[in-house]
Image (spheres, coloured by chain):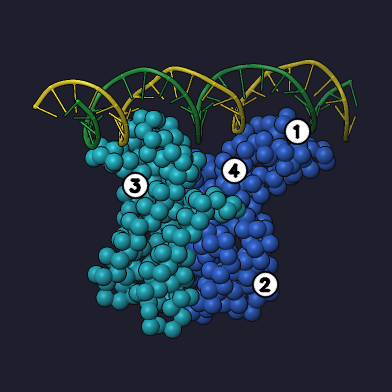
Chain colours: A cyan, B blue, C yellow, D green
DNA sequence: AAAAATATGTAGACCGGTCTATTCAGAAAT
DNA sequence: ATTTCTGAATAGACCGGTCTACATATTTTT
């Protein structure tokens, strides 16, 4: 794959991720993806012969890696578990507010939409969440109940993000940030 | 509206709620609603002249009232906040597992799908969440930080439900149940 | 090195099917 | 008898996906 091809492919994934994050699987209509990315329809099926499902699946996994990396970075520059959790919530709040309440969790919507099925997309979402859980668990290692705690922290963050999106306000994220110390402290 | 009319209307709302819960807004195609409810097409637009948006909006609000009521019931038969929270998680886990991972939160998917917009549906979701927050707050009254705590508990429950759906397993709900006592105890 | 051949990527018209929406004559209920 | 409710038909936008034609690299042959 040449340079131009790789760029087009990336642009398609970028556009898909943004659209998915804002409106879920059906929110990423191929026409919208094409319009947002500037890539022609033919290129889409050249780079993603598996069609929309492949496009969305790769996009979800890619976003999972990106956010996983961001988590690691935040963890490295925090001096305690509580501080880390608060930094994550603050970071997500900024991102959400700046995007006009569009950029929440790039996985959540698709995960809910596909939960009732067994298709590859559902699996992709599950794996991304599992990877984040593992990242949190590693940071909580040694602590009793580290496994339960990692899942609990992730649930709390995802839930806060959901409420913040629903209310179009960062208030839920701020409130949770004020209480999360009790959990991980 | 006669007796039969009311029944048809209810059947339409029931079917819509189930479909939304399983697959979000686009998962509730009007053809599917009609098929699932057994109601004729004409009736849909007779009872809901506002079309799909009205149907989904009323369905979300109705589900919000139903679950709000269930919350009150569970709270009445619990002897502590922690016990109450655990009962809620257990209840949701049962419901989710029995439905084959289809029945999670009837609001969450629509809330995420419409978060980027300002339409009436988004408002309906926000109001339902606000009503649940208020119900929790009332049960936590007197306690310091009751406001923050109510939002935090709701976020935790919604997040656990999201992860459980994503993994098609009640495990996240069980894990959170084991840790939620730390928060509300 | 020039020419030919092949692989890679772009471009958009086009397809059948499904979607929501709407109409309206007339059956059913009160 | 009048309101309430139904069922079938239709419309047109939109969907994901396929197709063919074209442009641009890259490699192979001479």
Which image quarter holds the C terminus of chain A? bottom left
In this rendering, is residue B167 above or below A55?
below
Which residue is disc 4 drawn over? B27
The residue indicated by pointer 1 is: B40
Residue marked by disc 3? A99
Dot 4 or dot 1, earlier in sequence: 4
Please say if the residues under marks 2 and 3 sit with CB atoms less than 8 Å apart.
no
Report how far apart the C-alphas of labels 2 and 3 lie in the structure: 41 Å
Left or right relative to A23: residue A82: left
Query: How far is disc 2 from disc 1 in space, using C-alphas?
Result: 41 Å
Residue A23's x, y, as percent? 46, 43
Residue at 72% x, 38% y is B35
Name the residue nearer the viewer: B34 or C13.
C13
- The residue at which mark 2 appears reads as B76
A106 or B109, nearer to the observer: A106
Mark 4–mark 1 distance (CA, rounded to whole Å):
19 Å
Up-down relation of residue B171 to residue B80 (above or below): above
Q: Position of residue B45 (x, y in %)?
A: 68, 31
The reply to whether the C-beta atoms of the residues labelled 4 and 3 are less than 8 Å apart is: no
Front residue of D30 and B17: D30
What is the distance, in whole Å, between disc 1 and disc 3 at their CAs? 42 Å
Circle 3 sits in a helix, a strand or a loop, which is it? loop
Dot in front, 4 or 3: 4
Q: Residue at x 82, y 39 (%)?
A: B4
Determine which quarter of the picture holds residue B10. top right
Among the 4 quarters of the image, the one containing residue A14: top left
Q: Mark 4: few, some, or many residues within 10 Å (few <14, many ≥20)?
A: some
* Distance (Cα) linking label 4 and label 2: 35 Å
């Amino acid at each position: 794959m040449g340079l131009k091809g790789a760029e087009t492919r990336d642009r398609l994934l970028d556009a898909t991720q943004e659209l998915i994050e804002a409106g879920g699987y059906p929110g990423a209509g191929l026409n919208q993806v094409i319009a947002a990315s500037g890539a022609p329809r033919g290129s889409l099926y050249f780079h993603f012969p598996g069609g929309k499902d492949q496009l969305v699946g790769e996009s979800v996994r890619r976003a999972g890696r990106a956010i996983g990396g961001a988590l690691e970075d935040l963890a490295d520059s925090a001096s305690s578990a509580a501080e880390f959790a608060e930094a994550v919530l603050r970071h997500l709040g900024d991102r959400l507010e700046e995007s006009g309440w569009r950029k929440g969790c790039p996985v959540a919507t698709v995960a809910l939409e596909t939960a009732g099925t067994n298709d590859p997309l559902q699996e992709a979402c599950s794996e991304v969440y599992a990877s984040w859980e593992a990242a949190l668990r590693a940071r909580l290692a040694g602590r009793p109940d580290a496994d339960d705690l990692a899942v609990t922290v992730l649930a709390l963050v995802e839930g806060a993000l959901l409420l913040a999106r629903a209310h179009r306000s960062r208030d839920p994220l701020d409130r949770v940030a004020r209480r999360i110390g009790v959990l991980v402290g």
